[in-house]
Image: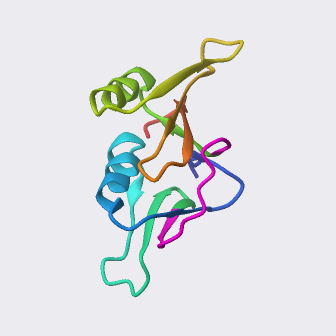
Amino acid sequence: MKPSRIQAVDHVNLEALPGVEEALRWFYGEIAELDDITESQSDTAVLRFRSERIEVRIRIVEQPAIDPVGYRVTIGVPNLDETAEQLLEAGSEIERISGLMWSDRRIATFDPAGHRVILKQHWATGPL
């Protein structure tokens, strides 16, 4: 089985205000390139995005708990430079982070709900 591009021990549970659903679909679906598995006829307002067995779940609530300082999830993206360009074109602020090795480059940004997210180059041995 391929490893998940969502780097977390378990599913990531977030909250967001109503009205940002489409922007979240763009961020997690288009930018992070996760699979949108949201059930269209769901009774509860929860957006779900998956990579392999791990999901990012975003519950839509009137008073979301959002921590803008600590990051909630790291997601591997196929091309970090293209991802940075897409975010900048959309008007998003990014912070480039470099580790000791060239392959440890990352981007810190905020999703449309205000959660800090780290995007890093995904170095898979096979196709994504």
Q: Is residue 25 magenta?
A: no
Relative to 41, 98 lies left or right: right
Identify the residue at horizontal 68%, vertical 17% (top origin): 99
Residue 59 percent location from the top left of the image: 50, 70
Identify the residue at horizontal 37%, vertical 40% (top origin): 31
**Vertical placement of 94 versus 69: above or below?**
above
Residue 73 percent location from the top left of the image: 61, 47
| Most distant residue in the bottom direction | 43
Relative to 77, 71 lies left or right: right
**Vertical placement of 101 versus 108: above or below?**
above
Q: Answer with the quarter of the image where residue 25 lies.
A: bottom left
Whether residue 60 is visible here, answered yes or no, is yes
Q: What stretch is highlighted in magenta?
A: 57-71
Whether residue 5 is visible here, answered yes or no, is no
Identify the residue at horizontal 36%, vertical 50% (top origin): 29
Question: Residue 122 versus residue 39: which sits nearer the camera?
Answer: 39
Residue 117 percent location from the top left of the image: 55, 41
Q: Does the magenta stretch include residue 63?
A: yes
Identify the residue at horizontal 53%, vertical 56% (top origin): 52
Relative to 81, 11 lies left or right: right
Of the 4 image quadrants, the one containing the C terminus is top left
